[in-house]
Amino acid sequence: MAIPTVAKSRRLRSTIYSSRIEKQGLKSYTVYNHMLLPASFSDTLEDSYFHLKEHVQIWDVAAERQIQISGKDSSKLVQLMTPRDMSKTLNGKCYYSPIIDSDAGIINDPIILKFNDDKWWVSIADSDLSLFAKGLAIGKDYEVDIFEPNVNIIAVQGPKSFKLMEKIFGSKILDLKFYNFDYFEFNDNNYLIARSGWSKQGGFEIYVENDEAGLKLYDELFEQGTQFNVKPGCPHLIERIESGLLSYGNDIDINDNPLECGFERFINLESSATFLGKDKLIKIKKDGISKKLMGVIIDINEIEMTGSLNLFFENNIIGELRSAVYSPTFKKVIGMAMIKKPYFNKDQKFEINLIDKSNQNIHTGKVCELPFV
Amino acid sequence: MAIPTVAKSRRLRSTIYSSRIEKQGLKSYTVYNHMLLPASFSDTLEDSYFHLKEHVQIWDVAAERQIQISGKDSSKLVQLMTPRDMSKTLNGKCYYSPIIDSDAGIINDPIILKFNDDKWWVSIADSDLSLFAKGLAIGKDYEVDIFEPNVNIIAVQGPKSFKLMEKIFGSKILDLKFYNFDYFEFNDNNYLIARSGWSKQGGFEIYVENDEAGLKLYDELFEQGTQFNVKPGCPHLIERIESGLLSYGNDIDINDNPLECGFERFINLESSATFLGKDKLIKIKKDGISKKLMGVIIDINEIEMTGSLNLFFENNIIGELRSAVYSPTFKKVIGMAMIKKPYFNKDQKFEINLIDKSNQNIHTGKVCELPFV
């Protein structure tokens, strides 16, 4: 049975870099925000993992779309959508902010970029957050403008990203602090660059606002990067699970609340901020959560996940494995699982029923804290 | 360059039928409402086209998700989202209803199923309409409950669908009128069935609410369908373009308003209904539209679309081709294009610049009315 290919169409938007990455050995796509997002290249998953941890990769993450919220009531709308206290946020900084509805269900977990009190970019995970924001703004009669600007991010990730970016943008780029953003010049074009990215190997995200300038920069990164062993890449399953970076839709969704997902530090229940789901979260905090996102280590050396898998203890379902992959570091399969109360403790043992090479087999594993490294 | 495969994960939800269709010769997937939707099987596009027009096909269209809107204010919320007058709608009927925002931009073009004044299903195209509905309901302080029930549609399409469905559900199913729905029994299970579907070859959509019963029915459809030459299938590019069935995200999107898309008969500007974008639509109707979705016929016999393509007349861009395919009926490429004023007239000529087998070539075509057949 051949692995199904992707049927392209205008609806699954290609990015401005798609034709380039397809020539660079792209093997598979995922779809994210109605856009193609590279999922693997010709290197094996393990080879690209070690490469990302040692060298530098260029990622087409244009699918990480921006929602611009601007106008008189924009701060009020942004605050309404997140339990994080935005009143003390600073211009030129990025804020990881869960977005929840009035039942405290997570709708998205974007990074919010604050330009100023009247202009924000919400760098979204895979759900149409613009529709939620629009609905709220219309319902509340807020004076805001909400749209998706033409921004196509290039991520430069890996320990050698600093040297590569310095070579192109000058040493000033090294002064940019983690989760800050600013404009930097290359060849008479200004690029909004944040020190951020969906790996823990260090790096930058370049918010390309001009297609032509973006393509020139994309090519320049590969040309200047030869000495740093640059390669094309994409968000990496092994690295992101080891690092405990959550994937909306995979590890968390609208049926989970932020207290179940380890987001305590992004929630300010004692602040005077007005946001959706506040009462609900206060009650959940008081009553205690009934499930919790945890790490798991499973005593096997391969797995392929296409959906959730149940975890058992003494014949009870104690949780749901949501993402998993073989880790060359741990020499076992590691993953993210939503574990029920009272089982969400470090070292809790479980069993999992997997189909390996046509045989059903029961395997053992244990729960652990996140992140793995 | 190999065609990229789909990287599966929990986020790109498989359907309850995925493992079956993959054994039945599935070749490619698209992604729709964060779910896998079959896009082609082992038969050629033309073979499956002729098959659909002569026999019967079973489609896994579980990706056509339902948003249930229920509660005291549900009628008010449904009406707020659509310019179609819902005050005269009847229980047990389906209504194709564009959903627009306050700028009259199209957000989705679902079929709305009315159970009663307090319970509706919105059978959505590819955007997170539940988030828009939630935002509005929260902002307006409406008493409604909004969620995505576990409904996984099987479409039975093609002229022999009537005989096949009669064989399974009895002759009562033949009394079901177009765009009506009701419950029908098979093997002690009740199935909500509508006479509808995303083809003009006739057929039904079975709204499966019980996974196990759905899988049994899926298998039964193939078993009982042998005598009708049943095959697995999926929404068909040639058939749907010929029939003028629009695809949200391909042919229309948030930058288009319903008057530009031929939706006049689904808009009731003179009604007393309160809906978003009403003033805006009244103004657009008065001032006239500046672009219009039209059919096009191009003098070539193959095309592969992965995004929009510009159409030219006397060196001006006069429109944007959004979907296109070779039609065995017209022996030319036919498509849907958004054509600018004053060019949106039948028989308007244009040129299109295509890359055929590595050569750039200018081809000619002309505008026509929709649907083609």
Image: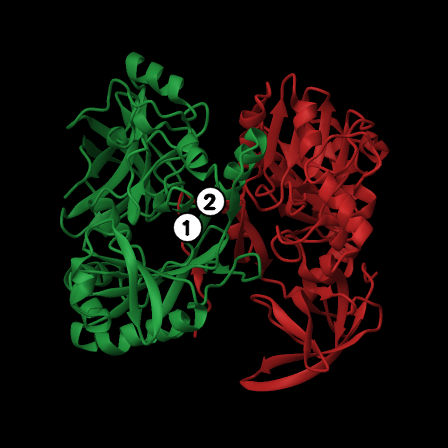
Chain colours: A green, B red
Residue A37, x across and y down, in percent: 41, 58
Chain at numbered mark 2: A
Residue B44, x across and y down, in percent: 63, 66
Q: Relative to B350, is A68 above or below?
A: above
- Which quadrant of the view contains residue A116? top left
Q: Residue at x 59, y 58 (%)?
A: B40
Q: Secondary structure at mark 1?
A: loop
Query: Tag 1: Cα neighbours inside 10 Å, few (<14), some, or many (≥20)?
Result: many
Q: Which label belongs to residue A69?
A: 2
Between A261 and B228, the residue placed more toward the observer is: A261
Q: Is residue B148 visible?
A: no
- Which quadrant of the view contains residue B133? top right
Q: Residue at x 26, y 44 (%)?
A: A245
Q: Residue beneath label 1, please?
A: B8
Residue type marked 2: Ile
Residue B11, x across and y down, in percent: 42, 44
Q: Is residue A219 visible?
A: yes
Residue type marked 1: Lys
Closer mark to the observer between disc 1 and disc 2: 2
- Position of A159 with respect to B248 (left or right) is left
What quarter of the picture does the N terminus of chain B occupy?
bottom left
Cα separation, mark 1 vs mark 2, equals 32 Å
- Position of B370 with respect to B105 (left or right) is right
